[in-house]
Amino acid sequence: MGLIVQKFGGTSVGSVERIKAVAKRVKSTVAQGNSVVVVVSAMGKSTDTLMQLAQGISATPCRRELDMLLSTGEQVSISLLSMALQALGQPAISLTGAQVGIVTEPEHTRARILHIATERLERHLQEGKVVVVAGFQGTSNTPDLEVTTLGRGGSDTSAVALAAALHAEKCEIYTDVAGVLTTDPRLVEAAQLMSEITCEEMLELASLGANVLHPRAVEIARNYGVQMIVRSSWTDEPGTQIISSGTQPQVLQDLELGRPVDAVHYDLNQAKVGLLHVADRPGVAASLFGELAHQGLDVDLIVQSIHEGNSNDIAFTVGQEWSGRAEAVATAFGPMLPQSDLSSRSVPEVIVERNVAKVSIVGAGIIGRPQIAAQMFQTLSDLGINLQMISTSEVNVSCTIAAQDCQRAIAALCAVFEVTSSSDSRLVLAGHDGPPVRGVALDLEQARLAIRNVPDRPGMAARVFQTLAQQNISVDMIIQSQRTHQVGGLITRDIAFTVAAMDLEVAQGLLQKVAATLGCGAVVSDSAIAKVSIVGIGMLGQPGVAAQMFAALAQRQINIQMIATSEIRVSCVVSQADGVKALQAIHNSFKLG
Ligand code: ADP
Ligand code: ASP
Ligand code: MG
C-alpha cells in the first residue's frame, strides 16, 4: 500500500464527462490498495478566460487581484471532482491550497513554495478519503495569508511538491498527450514518445518551450528524488519516466528556495576562435561547423550575435590542443565563400585567443531568478575580470575569461553561491549516457533585445542584467558580439539577449535608461522571433551535432540570427515566420520521428 499523487491537467478535467472519467481512474488506483492525493488544474482553458476578463479591465491588472481571480478556476474543478468521486462511492474531500497549508513566498503570480503542512492531508488519508487539492495556488507566509499563485502551468509544481512533502511513492502527471515526446505533437505530427528522460534534459526542454511540464516541477523532482511519470489521461500506456539522478535527502523547509546554484564548473583548457564579418545568409554556420566536425574537432561553446549590416560574427571554443586546426579551418573558410556573399571586407577576419577558461554556474534554481546571472557578472566584475563570451540557458550561465583569472573567479563564485567545491566540467559530465538529441523545442513567446556599443570593460554586463533582475525579468541567450567598435576612443561591443515577449516593453524602457547612464548606444528590439533548441545529454563530446542542426536549417533556407549553446543544448534564434518550419526540419534531420 503506497501513497500516490496524481495530477490532472486542464484538458483532462475539461468537461463533466472527463471529470467523471478521472474519478473512475482515481477510484481504481485506490482499489489497488493505494492512498491517493489528486491535484487538479482549472477546467479546460478557464484560466485563459479569467485572464482575458482581467485584461478587458486593465492592460496591467494588479498582481494580487489577478491571483484572487485566477485561483478560482481550480476551486471549480476540485469540488466537481470530489463530488464525482463521492458519486462513485469513494469518500473524498476537496481542499484549496490555503486549507492544505501550501505556504509560499508573498510574490503574487509567481510565488515559490516554502513549506507544505501535511497534518490535515494525512488525517483525511487516514480516514480513507481521497484528497483533491487545488493546484497552482497557495497562501503567503505573511500575517495576512494572501492568496498566491505559482505561475502559469504551476499545477505540476504543486503536485510534485506535495509528493515530496508527503514522501509519496510516486507522482503521476496525467495530460492530453502520451507523455514527453521528442517535440510538441501539435507542431510535428511525427513526434515520438520517449520512455524516459533525465531531469537535466527535461529541465532544459521545459524551460525552452516544451510546456508539457512546468520546469519548477522538474527541479523539485530532481532535488527531492521524487519519482515522476508523465502519462496520458485517455489510455493506460506507461508514459515517460523522468529520471532523477544523484538525489540528496533535503530538508523540506524552504522547499523551492534551496541553493539556486548547485555547482561551479570550469574548463581551463579552452581556446576561443572568432570569425568576424561572415556573410549573413543561410548555410554559413552549417558549412563552418560542418567542416570542423568533419575534422573531428569537438566544439564546446558557440555564440553568434545579432548581425550588423549584411555580416555576422561567429565565435566558438575548442580544447586548446585543437586550436591550431580550428584556426586553420576558420582561415580557409573565408575565401571559400562566393565573392557576392562577403561583406565590404574581402575575407572574414579570424581571431584566436589561446589561453581561455570557461567558468559556469549550474543549477535548476537559476530558473526564474534573473538575479543569479547578474550576481555572477557582478562577482567577476568586482575582481576586475572582463567577460569575453557569455552563453546562458535557464539552468546554466557560462562565461569565458582569460585563463590566468580562472582560479580567482572560481574561488569568488564558490563563496558567493555557497558552493563548497568547484570541478572540471569535463570530469563532471563524463559518463553521461543518452542520444545526442533527445528532444527539440520551439519557443514563440520570446523577443530579442540588444544594446549597441556597450563599453568593453568589466561591470557592464553586471549593470545591465542587474537592472532587469530587479524587475524580475529573466533573460536567456545573452550574447556579446565579438566585433568591437571604437566610439569616442572607447572600445565597445553589442550585447544581445532574449526575454519573454510579455516582458519586452518594460525591459526596453529599463534598458534605455541604463544605456544612457552607461554611455551605450541604441537599444534595438525584435519581437518577431522564434527560438528553436535541441537538447540531449549525448551531445557531450560528440562532434557535429550543432553542425547537423545548422545544416537542417540551411537546407530549408532558414537564416540563423543568433546561436547560443550549453553542454547539453544548442539554441538558434530564427525569424518567427520560420519557427515551425525550423522545428520540423531539425526534428526530421535527427530522425526523431
Ligand atoms: P496540462 O493541461 O495537462 O498541464 P499542457 O497543455 O500544460 O497540459 O501540456 C501538454 C501539452 O504540451 C501537449 O498537449 C503538447 O501540445 C505540449 N507539448 C509541448 N512540447 C511537448 C513535448 N515535448 N512532449 C509532449 N507534449 C508537448
Ligand atoms: N490553471 C493554471 C494555468 O492554466 C495552472 C495549470 O494548469 O497548471 O496556468
Ligand atoms: Mg500544464
Image (cartoon, rainbow, N blue to C red):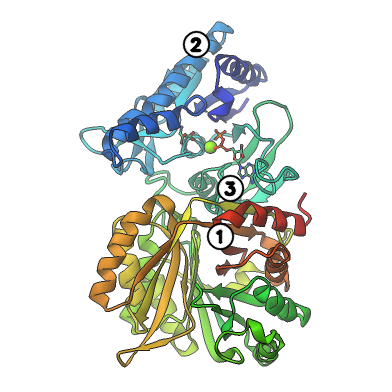
Q: Earlier in the sequence, mark 3 or mark 2?
A: 2
Q: Quadrant of ligand 1?
A: top right
Q: Earlier in the sequence, mark 1 or mark 2?
A: 2
Residue at image point 46% right, 27% down: 46
Amino acid type at image mark 3: Ala
Q: Can residue 152 be seen?
A: yes
Q: Does 50 appear above or below 304?
A: above
Disc 1, SS: strand
Mark 3 in CB contact with mark 1 (< 8 angstroms): no
Residue at image point 70% right, 53% down: 584
The location of residue 414, given as percent across then percent down, is 41, 71
Tag 2 residue: 83
| Label 1 CB-ligand 1 distance < 8 A | no
The location of residue 359, given as percent across then percent down, is 49, 76
The location of residue 466, given as percent across then percent down, is 31, 65
Residue that lies at the very extreme toward the front in this rendered image? 340
Residue 210: give its label: 3
Q: Can residue 424 be seen?
A: no
| Label 3 CB-ligand 1 distance < 8 A | yes
Disc 2, SS: helix
Tag 1 residue: 575
Q: Quadrant of the N terminus?
A: top right
